[in-house]
Amino acid sequence: MSQIRNSKSEIRNHKTYAIIVAGGTGTRMQSAVPKQFLLLNGEPVLMHTIRAFASTANKPEIIVVMHPEFHEYWQQLCTEHQFTIPHQLISGGETRFHSVKNGLALTEDNSLIAVQDAVRPLTSPAIIDKAYEQAAMQGNAIVAVKSRDSIRRLRNGRSENLLRDEIWLVQTPQTFQSSLLKKAYEQPFHQGFTDDASVVEQSGVDILLIEGDHRNMKITFPEDIAIAELLLRQ
């Protein structure tokens, strides 16, 4: 119990933020509408994602990073759905790396920053709070789940078995003390940066995993909407 009290005390010493990256264009969804705007149980996916963070004990300041072409459309959706959860809308960059960097410019030092995919609408508020707690104590917290399937790697035309128990599938949020994240994003961009953990790891910081949830799915393909609606009903 003392560890829980300590972790919550650590969080009280930090302001919390959530940078929600909503830069998708809808290509893999075969849709003219980017996937973060598709309806999930009658409401755009992004609204579910924002609500998850607004429902946490930590109540972070929410920053939504979006291509400027869609700002007006998003504001229309908020009016249409009477969506009033406070958030700051800013423009994204050329890549996810640059979009997150734009969001970081609005955060204060000595804070905790969670970076979230806009299209993970089923993220549990409890997992979000758990990530803030670990990041407060240990510097970072990357939500991930163990693979349920056997894993093979194809290299030089030859497949080889990997140990399933050593494979973790990375999700979001990825949460960091602001000093670590901001320092990491001072690095120049390169193609190896697939997420925030890879950026921070490249700066010399060990990445720490916390157990996520297989229901914390990323909306990527058309059938994912139907699966997410089923999970929401449960």
Image (tube, rainbow, N blue to C red):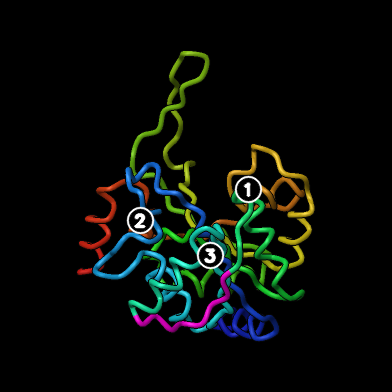
Which of the marked residues, 3 or 2, is nearer the chain's N terminus?
Answer: 3
Front: mark 2 or 1: 1
Q: Read off the magenta span.
A: 82-89
Seen from the viewer's position, the closer of residues 109 and 135 is: 109
* Label 2 Cα crowd, 10 Å radius (few <14 / some 14-19 / many 20+): some
Q: Quadrant of residue 136?
A: bottom right
Residue 214 is marked as 2
Q: Is residue 153 above or below residue 210?
A: above
Q: Are marks 3 and 2 in contact (CB under 8 Å)?
A: no
Classify residue 112 by image quadrant: bottom right
Which quarter shows the C terminus?
Answer: bottom left
Q: Is residue 234 above or below residue 35?
A: below
The structure residue drawn at horizontal position 42% and vertical position 38%, both measured from the top left corner, is 164
Question: How crowded is the residue under tag 3: few (<14 C-alpha within 10 Å), some, or many (20+)?
Answer: many
Q: CA distance from mark 2 to mark 1?
A: 30 Å
Q: Element at badge 3?
A: strand
Report the side of 91 relative to 212 (left or right).
right
Q: Is residue 133 magenta?
A: no
Task: Give the residue at x 51% y 54%.
Answer: 23
- Quadrant hosting residue 149: top left
Instruction: Label 1, secondary structure: give it.
Output: loop
Amino acid on which disc 2 is placed: His
